[in-house]
Image (cartoon, rainbow, N blue to C red):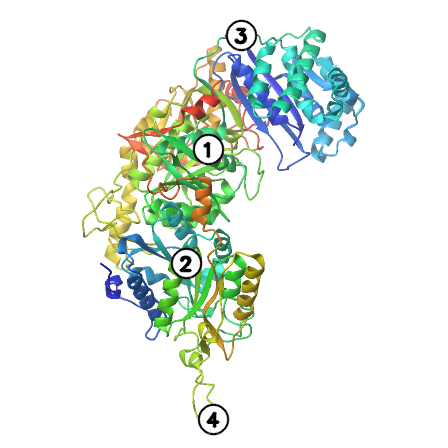
């Protein structure tokens, strides 16, 4: 029987700041798991370090709170060893695009069938508000001593360039839309990436909830114009339908250009989706024909305390 | 008294087939019943720099190389310049007669410090700076010279076989060198043919050319060079003898003990093990469908250990394999594994540090680093294999320790192991047991991963198990695995984890912790691959009526201090032998037992110890002529 979102909650006290965008994301994940009929003990949430790292403690599935920048390494290892698990990795933008950027790129090349959600707020919250990789050059959030001297990473563009086969952006205050994106991402046969814009009410006084809502963009009739809009409402078509180089390049280029849009109009929704790229598990199966039905985690390695592996042919070949 | 104890050396530029030549030679000798101890030395380079292989052949079990070379096969000038002085009186040098006038300056890969030493030597003996010059010195010492024009051999062969391609096929030089050597020592020729057929069984065309070249060269030498003192007619073969490369011990051990997941990042000298595992990734399973090892090449060592931990959390026996620089990157994660009681095995093939150091050379530089690796206090095991044969069985033990004690285990190996080729008794998989400790297959509701138990070890669930949900965190946690900063819970959890160290010393059988080869007035403590040369040196001294004891340390952390102290209570003089600068085992020993070692025999030139130099130094110690710290230098 499918579980309710509440059944994916733990009793652990949530200590995020009031008004934190992270709440929306964790709620959306719980709703998405319920929506998909996920089984608690066949699902694992891996998290990095920082405020977002605590997410795994708030979700009632297997939860692995890893190290700063390294969440993808643990998550991919678990998924490859036990491909039956539903694996969702989460972390902040500093975690995934700063210290963990190398793993981000390498994960794209592998295309392991799992989901990575970045809580993107432009600051390092838990260390009191330093600039993170998505903060723009020259911006000065309130706890920075001086304006940011680095240019920003474009998470969507980097994901596309790295080979992620599902790339989308959500907004933490549009929980229903975010939930739908998470469901799509988890169901995607390959590595999916979700960049979630998540205002940090304590340290990022630039990209606030009001700013995303366009409070500063009122027209003459005092009507707000939200910066956030949905790609799917504009007729944008992210999906690669045919496995042809021409179409793939076209969709990649389109997504890359779209990823550069920022300012008064910020796109959310699916930027790019390609189900034709072989997931890593299939690549492994090409080498190891029974990999999926007899995965590393499933293999029986002993009988009565002794090995059942027969290496006698190898030993014969080494014998003189 | 051993009737055969013969050392053969082949050298040449990297990429010229030195290694395959040595493999053919070793295989032939092993087929003919001899025991082999071979070692490869090479530069961090793909093509062109000097590499060489020393193969020691005996009719009894040997554990090391010696200083003396009895026959050297060379086909380039550099090998002669670098090794002519290792060949002893009565030994021989096979060389390409077309190289006689080659000057030292014409060999661009001779580095300045070496060339300076060589020139000084030639000058002092009044010889020209040429191949002819060094060969004269050898000849005056009593070395026999075997000039052969490799070019003419190929030319004649090409005419005889009507194969014009052969004429310029200089990559046959290695086979010529090997075959000339075997002809000189009168090795029965059919073993050479059989070995070549075996090695090239999948490439009949190549096998044929090699066969022709080998036969011709063998006959050429057998007919022309008759005066050599050493012969290798073959000896009785010990049934069930393997010819193995160093890295195969741990790799085969991993297959047998059920390691099914090995992420790794390429690094010398560790990658060979992973590549070998992947080459044999499909496994035969008795009474079941095939099994497999998923070997994953990652983007760096951090990912390698991260994936390994992820795999271990699913209940899969998981390992990675690396060397010092890679291990350095893994240390943060090592603490995470310790904190979360995750059984992972890190096979650490050490090389010479610090930093990049001598990346293709030997060293036991990382003992203290591994023992103290990671920030904060957490339990782990550091376990060191002595000889290659042991490493197969030790691999099984390491995985059991990891599972039973739920700790990361660092299995210490090194470059000397990795690039040795040896004969040993066929590995017996039956001797490896599999103990997964408190790993659960099923669990009822109310499971808590880090439940406090009497002995501090909690039943272990795995990702994906029904009702087995747990949380992990690198933060301090409570019994469920959720974050806590409660001071009392903190102390309880630290005590729970750290009590593992006592338990390890209690429960691992003492004979797996330390191996005593006898305690004498003079007793050696040593570890890792250095055990091999030490054993042989002790044997040499025994023949002279000098008894030296030996304690091999295998469990390096937690250190079995009481057991070691009591074993050594009758040893008056303790000699530490190891391949690093600071005498790391000696320091660890003192830290744990309070006792200082009396002598240190150390080597950090990047070359493994020979039994000859250990023997010489031990003798100096016994004769009271040694310094407290003796540094060994042998080896080009």
Looking at the picture, does residue B606 appear above or below residue A3? above
Inter-mark Cα distance, 2 to 1: 32 Å
Q: Which residue is mark 1?
A: B280
Q: Tag 2, which chain?
A: A
Q: Which residue is mark 4?
A: A220
Q: Secondary structure at mark 1?
A: loop
Q: Tag 1, which chain?
A: B
Q: Tag 3, which chain?
A: B
- Dots 2 and 3 on the same chain: no
Inter-mark Cα distance, 2 to 4: 44 Å
Q: Which residue is mark 2?
A: A188
Q: Residue at x 68, y 23 (%)?
A: B172
- Dots 2 and 4 on the same chain: yes
Q: Quadrant of the C terminus of chain B?
A: top right
Q: Which residue is mark 3?
A: B3
Select label 3 or label 4 by which is in front.
4
Inter-mark Cα distance, 1 to 4: 72 Å
Select label 2 or label 3 by which is in front.
2
- Dots 1 and 4 on the same chain: no
């Amino acid at each position: 029987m499918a579980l309710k979102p509440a059944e994916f909650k733990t009793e652990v006290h949530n200590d995020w700041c009031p008004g934190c965008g992270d709440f929306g994301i964790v709620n959306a994940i719980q709703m998405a798991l319920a929506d998909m009929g996920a089984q608690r003990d066949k699902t694992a949430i891996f998290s990095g370090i920082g405020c977002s790292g605590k997410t795994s403690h708030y979700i009632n599935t297997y939860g692995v709170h890893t190290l700063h920048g390294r969440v993808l390494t643990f998550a991919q290892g678990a998924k490859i060893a036990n491909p039956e698990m539903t694996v969702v990795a989460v972390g902040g933008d500093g975690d995934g695009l700063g210290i963990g950027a190398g793993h981000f790129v390498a994960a794209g090349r592998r295309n392991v069938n799992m989901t990575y959600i970045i809580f993107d707020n432009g600051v390092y919250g838990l260390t009191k508000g330093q600039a993170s990789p998505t903060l723009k050059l020259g911006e000065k959030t309130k706890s920075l001593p001086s304006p940011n001297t680095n240019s920003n990473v474009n998470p969507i563009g980097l994901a596309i360039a790295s080979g992620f086969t599902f790339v989308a952006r959500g907004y933490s205050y549009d929980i229903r839309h975010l939930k739908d994106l998470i469901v799509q991402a988890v169901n995607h046969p390959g590595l999916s990436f979700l960049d979630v814009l998540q205002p940090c009410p304590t340290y990022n006084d630039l990209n606030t909830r009001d700013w995303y809502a366009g409070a500063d963009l009122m027209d003459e009739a005092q009507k707000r114009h939200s910066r956030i809009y949905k790609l799917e409402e504009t007729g944008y078509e992210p999906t690669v339908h045919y496995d042809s180089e021409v179409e793939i390049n076209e969709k990649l280029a389109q997504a890359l250009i779209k990823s550069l849009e920022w300012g008064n109009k910020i796109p959310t929704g699916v930027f790019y989706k390609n189900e034709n790229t072989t997931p890593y598990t299939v690549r492994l199966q090409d080498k190891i024909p029974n990999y999926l039905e007899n995965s590393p985690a499933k293999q029986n390695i002993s009988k009565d305390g002794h090995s059942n592996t027969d290496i006698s042919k190898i030993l014969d070949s080494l014998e003189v | 008294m051993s009737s055969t104890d013969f050392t053969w050396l082949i050298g040449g530029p990297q990429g010229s087939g030195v290694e395959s030549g040595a493999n053919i030679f070793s295989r032939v000798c092993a087929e003919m019943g001899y025991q082999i101890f071979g070692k490869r030395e090479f530069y961090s380079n793909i093509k062109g720099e000097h590499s060489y292989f020393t193969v020691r052949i005996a009719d009894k079990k040997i554990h090391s190389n010696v200083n003396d070379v009895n026959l050297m096969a060379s086909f380039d000038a550099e090998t002669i310049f670098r090794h002519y002085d290792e060949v002893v009186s009565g030994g021989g040098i096979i060389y390409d007669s077309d190289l006689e006038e080659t000057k030292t300056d014409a060999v661009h890969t001779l580095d300045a410090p070496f060339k300076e030493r060589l020139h000084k030597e030639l000058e002092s003996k009044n010889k020209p700076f040429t191949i002819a010059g060094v060969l004269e010195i050898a000849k005056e010492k009593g070395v026999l010279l075997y000039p052969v024009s490799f070019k003419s051999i190929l030319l004649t062969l090409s005419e005889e076989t009507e194969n014009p391609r052969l004429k310029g096929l200089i990559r046959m030089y290695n086979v010529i060198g090997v075959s000339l050597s075997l002809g000189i020592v009168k090795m029965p020729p059919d073993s050479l043919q059989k070995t070549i057929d075996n090695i090239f069984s999948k490439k009949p065309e190549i096998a044929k050319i090699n066969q022709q070249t080998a036969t011709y060269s063998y006959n050429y030498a057998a007919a022309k060079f008759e005066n050599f003192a050493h012969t290798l007619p073959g000896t009785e073969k010990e049934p069930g003898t393997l010819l193995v490369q160093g890295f195969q011990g741990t790799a085969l051990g991993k297959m047998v003990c059920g390691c099914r997941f090995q992420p790794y990042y390429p690094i010398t000298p560790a990658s060979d093990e992973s590549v070998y595992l992947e080459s044999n990734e499909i496994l035969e399973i008795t009474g079941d469908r095939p099994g497999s090892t998923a070997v994953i090449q990652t983007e760096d060592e951090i990912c390698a250990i991260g994936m390994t931990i992820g795999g271990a959390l699913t209940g899969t026996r998981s390992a990675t394999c690396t060397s010092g620089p890679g291990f350095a990157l893994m240390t943060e994660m090592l603490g995470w594994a310790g904190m979360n009681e995750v059984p992972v095995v890190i096979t650490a093939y050490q090389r010479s540090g610090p930093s990049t150091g001598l990346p293709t050379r030997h060293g036991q530089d990382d003992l203290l680093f591994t023992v103290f690796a990671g920030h904060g206090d957490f339990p782990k095991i550091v376990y060191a294999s002595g000889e290659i044969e042991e490493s197969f069985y030790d691999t099984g033990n390491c995985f059991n320790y990891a599972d039973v004690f739920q700790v990361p285990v660092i299995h210490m190996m090194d470059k000397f192991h990795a690039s040795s080729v040896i004969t040993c008794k066929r590995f017996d998989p039956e001797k490896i047991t599999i103990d997964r400790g408190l790993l659960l297959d099923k669990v009822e509701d109310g499971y808590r991963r880090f439940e406090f138990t009497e002995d501090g070890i909690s039943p272990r669930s795995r990702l994906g198990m029904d009702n087995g949900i747990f949380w992990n965190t690198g933060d301090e946690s409570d019994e469920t695995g959720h974050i806590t900063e409660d001071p009392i819970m903190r102390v309880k959890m630290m005590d729970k984890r750290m009590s593992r160290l006592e338990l390890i010393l209690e429960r691992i059988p003492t004979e797996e912790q330390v191996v005593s080869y006898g305690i004498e007035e003079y007793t050696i403590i040593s570890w890792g691959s250095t055990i091999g040369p030490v054993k042989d040196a002790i044997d040499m001294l025994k023949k002279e009526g000098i008894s030296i004891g030996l304690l091999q340390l295998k469990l390096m952390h937690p250190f079995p201090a009481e057991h070691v102290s009591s074993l050594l209570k009758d040893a008056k003089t303790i000699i530490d032998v190891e391949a690093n600068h600071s005498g790391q085992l000696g320091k660890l020993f003192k830290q744990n037992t309070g006792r200082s070692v009396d002598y240190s025999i150390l080597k950090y030139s990047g070359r493994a110890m020979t039994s000859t130099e250990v023997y010489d130094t031990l003798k100096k110690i016994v004769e009271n002529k040694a310094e407290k710290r003796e540094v060994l230098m042998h080896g080009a």
